[in-house]
Image (tube, helix red, strand yellow):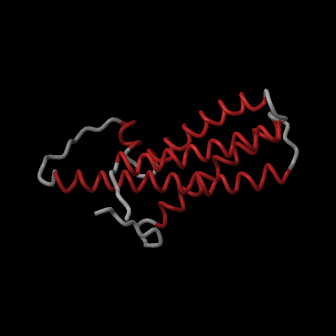
Amino acid sequence: MPLRIRWKSDEYLPIGLMMLGACGLFQLVFIFIAQYFLSIGNYLVVILIPIGITIALYYASRLIFESYAQVERRKKLRSQFQKAKDLEKKFQSFLDFPITKPLLIVFLSFVGIYIASYVICILIFDNIMSFLVSENLAAIFCLFLANFFEKNYAKIRKF
């Protein structure tokens, strides 16, 4: 049975808002890069498209978060009586924070697909169209990646 996370509850509302804020700050960096380094001057493209992309990245990170929560819940139910490990590395404790893994997965995949598609699109289109195509393609890839995590990593079946 899939784990249902109530995002409006007191426990998960701060996590959801942190993920939304991190996705917004991530897109703010892309707005800065687009305006100053890629010389895109169309404000509708630079403001409206990243708002939609922010929502898509937030949804993708939410799906990956729910997948990790489902796997952790399954692992906790199976190994209730094992001893806890005392020493943890700093990097591992950083990754154990609930929103770190989903955001890293989404952001790294977004940046990789964005750079690859922008390099290809700049050969065919102008700056504005290359920015639009690259952002949308990277966001769609992140949504497919989140769906892949949900289906194959957490093995959640929605009916």
Q: Residue furthest left?
A: 81
**Residue 120, position as x, y percentages in the image:** 72, 28
- Please provide percent x and percent y for residue 145: 49, 44
- The residue located at (16%, 51%) in the rendering is 79
Q: Is residue 109 left or right of residue 67?
A: right
| In the displayed structure image, the side of residue 9 where residue 20 appears, left or right | right
Which quadrant, please, contains the C terminus? bottom left
Residue furthest out toward the bottom:
9
The residue shown at (54%, 62%) is: 17
Horizontally, residue 43 falls left or right of residue 2, namely right
Task: Please provide percent x and percent y for residue 77.
Answer: 19, 56
Residue 144 position (above or below residue 17): above
The quarter of the rendered structure image containing the N terminus is bottom left
Q: Position of residue 126 (x, y in %)?
A: 85, 35
* Image vertical order of residue 146 relative to residue 3, above or below: above
Q: Residue furthest front?
A: 159
Q: Residue at x 42, y 70 (%)?
A: 6
| Residue in the foreground of this view, choosing between 93 and 55 | 55
Q: Nearer the viewer, residue 117 or 6?
A: 117
Residue name at image x 30 percent, y 51 percent: 71
In the displayed structure, 101 sits above or below 121; it is: below
